[in-house]
Image (cartoon, coloured by chain):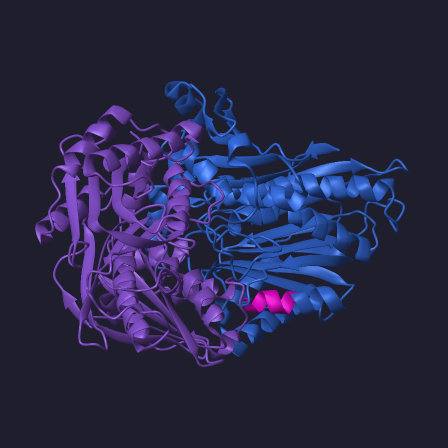
Chain colours: A blue, B purple
Amino acid sequence: MQLIKGGVTAPKGFMAAHAAAGIKYAGRDDMAMIVSRKPCIAAGTFTRNVVKAAPVLFDKEIVEKSDEVHTVVVNAGIANACTGEEGFSYCRQTAEVAERELGFPSDSTLVASTGVIGMQLPMDRVKAGVVKLAGALDDSNEASDAAAAAIMTTDTRPKQVAVGVMMSDGSEIRIGAMAKGSGMIHPDMCTMLCFITTDCNIDKQLMSEALRSVVCDTFNMISVDGDTSTNDTCLLLSNGEAGNKRIVSEDKDFAAFTEGLFYVARKMAMMMAGDGEGATALFEVKAVHCRDRQEAKTFAKSVITSNLTKAAIFGHDANWGRILCALGYSGASFDPSRVDISVESENGRIELVKDGVATDYSEELASRVLSAEKVTCICDMKQGIEEATAWGCDLTYDYVKINADYRS
Amino acid sequence: MQLIKGGVTAPKGFMAAHAAAGIKYAGRDDMAMIVSRKPCIAAGTFTRNVVKAAPVLFDKEIVEKSDEVHTVVVNAGIANACTGEEGFSYCRQTAEVAERELGFPSDSTLVASTGVIGMQLPMDRVKAGVVKLAGALDDSNEASDAAAAAIMTTDTRPKQVAVGVMMSDGSEIRIGAMAKGSGMIHPDMCTMLCFITTDCNIDKQLMSEALRSVVCDTFNMISVDGDTSTNDTCLLLSNGEAGNKRIVSEDKDFAAFTEGLFYVARKMAMMMAGDGEGATALFEVKAVHCRDRQEAKTFAKSVITSNLTKAAIFGHDANWGRILCALGYSGASFDPSRVDISVESENGRIELVKDGVATDYSEELASRVLSAEKVTCICDMKQGIEEATAWGCDLTYDYVKINADYRS
């Protein structure tokens, strides 16, 4: 596997476009489109929040029933969530305009929205935006750069990645992705919005399996604020244009494809966590030597979602008591008198707790280790061989500021 | 039932004391003591965090094995959590000094600590503090006022309450309480520290049952930050000095006692939530018309623990989408298209959502309703007859500030 430039347009046959439709933000792009001329098979994972946004309900149907997906239309600013029948009809109308403009059949378009909950989309502007997008499609890296920027809300930077993976027949398949997500991030099945494209020739059922398995260990292991969104969506489109021998079983090629997908999804997940609203640091927590994977995930997620721990990370304070406390209320059992806790970053590594009690560590060195853009905490539970990693961010003044007046 | 002045010294035969022992804070009281000359039966509920502080382990033993409890010794500043065998031995030493000074038998003293996790108590100062406390006992309201202030950490105000309850034989029993709690508040079985005294003559088993049932609907329904402490302790001592006919069955008197206890516990719980670290408002959430009590609690707790909702309350922003979203990820099921959401305060009441979609409400009025010291949100789920209430607070800059440098 190798990292390559670009994002969703890196795989063969995919184009992207961006447009300023004036949905909510002024003076910036707020719509994006991904298109493959060749029809794609699609897989998706969606929020498990009982309150599902209209595009989530719409896309679930399309992913299930259609094997000829061409287009994804995305808007930022308004989430089209809690908008009733009217909101759902807007998904259909958006798709219809795209299909008419691009000459594709019905049920070939997926839609996604992010932004404020409860407002209706201004459909005149959305439709005009779709027309603009359809006329601006391009398969360059610049096109994917601009599309990744167009779907941001409180994100401070666009998020994309692409990899190439060698298949056993000598062909190279590619996987590209773009994502947005910064607040209301505590995904359950998938995170805010992520769009993954691939030219890999693969069976639809196998592709869905690969996506599901990857999402569990990547997007479902990040949290910014513990709030699971109504719009969480991860879509994976494959047009098969790489020309590789079709993957029809869980063979070596399937493993290579899944590994590439995992890399892409983890990268997107980490970029979202590190760009959490108001965040100054990406906070990575590894729970190691656990009895099983689920237990390891439970420990890691409990620590990254602890407000007190997150505030301590912001303050560069090696407050290991809060970490041990968060392990303690996670719901999984362990012997507190055996736990070791270390933190590490580009500034060094330091063991804070050995067998449940504080080591004689230097607070100054600990504070230096915590003053990095990425901080890793390792919790050694000493009760098994499994491990898991979760990603979050610190809790800052700016998180409060952003969310005390997000709508205004 | 009637509200009376004072706190833990309001029931007959209870005294309190306060002292400045210099454990961590300078220039303020940091130790308190509650004493009954007549031996008490005791009940307690404690944290369910796997990581339990030494005083929690110590008190659990005493509450179970002793029917002659006289004394509670409390210190603020250091939590005596994650302190191993050494920390546990300090509980025993503290109790021994109290018992020697006051002339009470072994196993008659409970201890409680709150503050930083992981530091050992300076035992010379603690012991000197106990000697001071033993010489300063007093049954006045001033003594309980000062004791309630001495146990504060980041609390901004002392918390106490007392009630009188008439028994069927014409006697009045009293229940008094003091509590502290502001951060790391997400109790599981009980909250930070709460001490309840009563002179009611009651069977120990029945008293324990009353406490357990009351704690479930009061302390276990508050959250400041989702972090369940290692030290959560609620102790209830009864010396029987009211002289009422002993309560030995679940009769009318038991119901009256439990009602009084519920009032006291709920008052303490609400005071803790409203004085959450950095809080500017007490946030009360009622989930009504639910299928059962547990479901109602799940909904109410999900909303009060949502960081996004809490930040919106701080911003006086009627961001009902976040409330509906938090109901949606609570884990309990419902039909989003039937839910009504209202907010109310001393400034008025306003319906924000009717049948799952926004009403045509005035943002200005909504903002006024949210600009009060106590804000109530009513979520009408329309699927049953049960309800539950939870209490929390807003998420503010000051919460982050307090917790980014708590130890320094």
Q: Using the rendered view, name the quadrant where residue B268 is placed.
A: bottom left
Can residue A26 be seen from the camera position used here? no
In the picture, the quarter occupied by the N terminus of chain A is top right
For the stretch drawn in magenta, the main secondary structure is helix
Q: Using the rendered view, name the quadrant where residue B61 is placed.
A: top left
Q: Name the residue: 32% across, 52% down.
A: B235
| Coordinates of residue B396 in the picture (x, y in percent) | 30, 49
In this rendering, the answer to whether B208 lies above or below A202 is: below
Q: Name the residue: 65% across, 63% down.
A: A110
| Coordinates of residue A135 in the picture (x, y in percent) | 62, 58
| Coordinates of residue A285 in the picture (x, y in percent) | 54, 36
- Of residues A67 and A275, the one nearer the viewer is A275
> Is residue A145 shown left or right of residue B283?
right
How many circles with numbers are drawn on the protein? 0
In this rendering, the answer to whether B359 lies above or below B309 is: below
In the picture, the quarter occupied by the C terminus of chain A is bottom left
Magenta span has A54? Answer: yes
> Is residue A151 shown left or right of residue B342?
right
- The residues colored magenta run A52-59
| Coordinates of residue A45 in the picture (x, y in percent) | 66, 57
> Is residue B295 shown left or right of residue B376?
right
